[in-house]
Image (cartoon, rainbow, N blue to C red):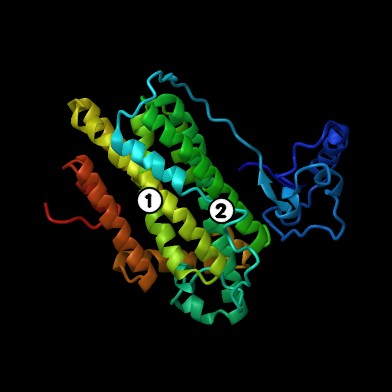
Amino acid sequence: MPVRRRVARNIWTSSAPSAFAAHWRWFFKKICTAPQPTSRPRSRARCRPPAMDMWAPISSLRVNIAATIPLCYCVVMDPFAIPSTFTTTFALEYGVSEVDMRRLYENAKRDQWNATRDIPWADAPSPDGRVIADELVDIYGSPLWDRLPEADRVALNRHVAAWRLSVLMHGEQGAMLACSQMVDIVQGADAKFFQATQVMDEARHNEVLSRYITDRLDGLKYPMPANERDIFDSILSESRWYLKTIALQLVAETFAVSLFKMMSESARDPVLGTVCKRILQDESRHMGFGMLSLPKVVSEASEAERRELEDYTCFALEKTLLGFFPLEAYQDAGFSPAQIDEAKRYRRETAASNDYAPFRKYFKRDLHGSMVANLARLGLLTDRVRPRLQKLGVTLPAS
């Protein structure tokens, strides 16, 4: 697991004037090399900024954006490198050659929004402190849930929300990096222009989710789960744009559209509802890129190439749909190993019987319906793919 350090930083005023650079390098070195507590290495205690404005010397010399955005005090992980090799295509013809793709680009320009200005950050949170609907907590409705005092239910709600939003936050950065590669790789100005707008969209999503966790969940950020790391290791090291597109704009974006739709409709914190609605309008557009760009690739693929497309689709689906259990959230909420085992067992039983709470049932139906329809439209819902989808629990129409 990556080494995590608790660091005080202001990511919006980090490029300090040169007169202060040496001072801040010394400051960060002092903080980062300070002895770390060993009694609870997994602890992510809530961090609050000190009363004094330690960043005033910098912010007073810069544009007044620092006055509108809070400091980020959080647990951070060391960055990691993913080797990649791809061919950059320089497009020299800038006119419209793909009308639908250019229209997608025009829509992206029209629908840009500002995470600082367009989210009502000052709105009051929910009265009881809940962030998401309790129905989105894995153990909701179980005997274990029924035994919890109200205060513990609220605490678990917030921890699970922080874990799920952290997963999405990391995914948005992964998407930003992948789309920045796609700008290089894809052919034609229309596709390059659109991918450039998606880089901006994903950066904004990364920013807004990070700020939400900082502002509304006391900076409680969780590390990247193994499955998420696996899929982005693959996407970012892959040199072919169409395989990146299958994993990102087809599988991940279809999942994201259904997830943000559910969260926007069920959020207990109105600010989270607004965040999810804003992100949702972008994700729907991103999914459109895959639906416009992939049909020709699939239809012209050889038998061997088609098998590779099918296998990569199933790999992406497996990594997206399986293996996401908020273990750290339950640990930080004070659950014992026996209680966590009980939670996992209840989750397995619920999945096997499809006895989900209403919000989750709607999400599953919407996700499976959209995923199957998109795969069928692209020609990827083949006899090789169908049984693998069924094994993942995806409901399929009759052949």
Question: Mark 2 is on which residue type?
Answer: Ser
Residue drawn at the location 40% of the way across and 45% of the way down: 107
Q: Find disc 1 in the rendering and name its residue.
A: 284
* Distance between the alpha carbons at the discs numbered 2 and 1: 21 Å
Secondary structure type for disc 1? helix
Q: Residues within 10 Å of mark 2 (few under 14, many from 20)?
A: many
* Label tally: 2
- Nearer to us in this view, 230 or 343: 230
Secondary structure type for disc 2? helix
- Nearer to us in this view, 239 or 325: 239
352 sits to left or right of 383: right
345 sits to left or right of 152: left
For marks 2 and 1, the one nearer the N-term is: 2
Residue drawn at the location 30% of the way across and 68% of the way down: 353
In the rendered image, the residue lying farthest to the left is: 399
Residue 112 location (% of width, % of height)? 50, 48
Residue 344, placed above or below residue 280: below
307 sits to left or right of 269: left
Please state, as top left, top right, bottom left or bottom right, where the N terminus lies in the image: top right
Q: Quadrant of residue 123?
A: bottom right
- Residue 253 can be seen, yes or no: yes
Residue drawn at the location 30% of the way across and 67% of the way down: 354
Question: Mark 1 is on which residue type?
Answer: Ser
Residue 138 location (% of width, % of height)? 46, 67
220 sits to left or right of 22: left
Q: Find disc 2 in the rendering and name its residue.
A: 166
Q: Nearer the viewer, mark 2 or mark 1?
A: 1
Residue drawn at the location 52% of the way across and 72% of the way down: 268
- Residue 330 can be seen, yes or no: no
Residue 59 location (% of width, % of height)? 80, 46
- Nearer to us in this view, 300 or 193: 193
